[in-house]
Image (cartoon, grey):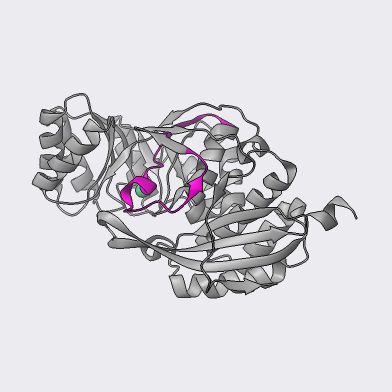
Amino acid sequence: MTSLDRTAITKIQLWTLDIPTTDPFVVATGQLNTAQNIIVKLTLRDGSVGFGEIAPFTDITGETVTDSLKTAQSLANSLLGTSVYQYRRLAQQFQNYAPNFPATRCGMETAVLDALCRSAGIPLWTLWGGADVRERETDITIPICNPARTLTLGQEWYERGFRLFKMKVGHDVDKDIQRIETLHQSLPDVTFLVDPNQGFTRDAAATFIEGVKKVGGIIEILEQPLPKDDLEGAAWLSQTYHIPIAADESVQTVSDAQLVIQHKAANFINLKITKSGVLETLDIVTLAKQSDLKLMIGGMLETRITMGCSFSLVLGFGGIEYLDLDTPLLLETDPVKGGYTYRCSYLQPWYNPGLGVSLPPPANSEVIQ
Ligand SMILES: [Mg+2]
């Protein structure tokens, strides 16, 4: 039996996993109260398993749970009998079949990569080079909410050791400035990563930047302030106000990243494997490293399965400056065992093969074999 035979996929299980959020996850483009995700579990002929997670966020990638599940079933059928050693071929196959389902592709790719590394006996970050294996600090997200709740959440996270707050804003500039002022006065050593999720006009962004400066808050990065196609506007903001701008919704693909570079429309790209797929994210990392774009990494509403895959890129590639890998902390429960852990605001590397995680399938999981 060759190594390709030993690592052929013999079984795929799919099931949905709903986990409520601790607070309504409100951003400028929508709201979620529950992470409604799909778990993928692969089994190989040699007995190795691999886990992946599909986390559709309809407002960002247009995928719904129902459509993602159907697409995942089709992709799963095409996987049977193929070796996970042919990862790029499989990822390309997913890309060709489901170009508009990046979250679905991401879940399938993650399961393939996890199984591949478990079969080889290496942690997933080894596959990317193990360039920077150490604990890393993440920010914590404060969703759009009133100033009183903002302060309560901020104080709670501060007590738990968080010092970089990711502020969701974009509904009302005056209130946004007020929320930052309230936090800054109460917790002066906290700094801010601000994310309007395309919710500002150019004027509103200018008002916001000047308003926050006046109240003394420090913005480390302003992420996707303007509609994703307004690259000229983003370049103008960056040059006029000398504030680091991150492109999130503006960059889903490598060609998007090329356009951002041409327009000088960002200082950072916010990588997300759920919006781009894993393979496309690897290509965006390569492109960014050839330009002077810096990198940060975030996610949708994900458990430690998808987020562990994102953390593997941080540990493996190195050079990813900011981590926004906090969403497992915003969910009411964490059903995933093993894998990376949190020590206060710091993600701890793991050393078991693959993602090092486990999650038992329910009795009603769909089995494809
Ligand atoms: Mg964002």
> Looking at the picture, how far across and down is residue 250, in whole percent?
42, 51
Q: Nearer the viewer, residue 295 or 211?
A: 295
How many tags in the picture? 0
Q: Residue at x 16, y 28 (%)?
A: 187
Residue 309, picture quadrant: top right
- Which residues are the magenta region? 317-340
303 sits left or right of 162 in the view: right
Q: Does the magenta-highlighted stretch encompass residue 330?
A: yes
Q: Residue at x 56, y 56 (%)?
A: 52
Q: Does the magenta-highlighted stretch encompass residue 19?
A: no
The residue positioned farthest toward the top in the image shown: 189
Instruction: Answer above or below: position of 115 versus 263.
Output: below
Question: Does the image show residue 36?
Answer: yes
> Looking at the picture, how far across and down is residue 183, in whole percent?
14, 35
Q: Residue at x 37, y 48 (%)?
A: 327
Instruction: Answer above or below: position of 142 versus 112.
Output: above
The N terminus is located in which quarter? bottom right
The residue positioned farthest toward the front in the image shown: 363
> Looking at the picture, how far across and down is residue 315, in whole percent?
55, 33
Question: Does the image show residue 267?
Answer: no
The C terminus is located in which quarter? bottom right
Residue 51, picture quadrant: bottom right
> Looking at the picture, how far across and down is residue 164, in whole percent?
29, 32
12 sits left or right of 182 in the view: right
Q: Residue at x 19, y 47 (%)?
A: 204
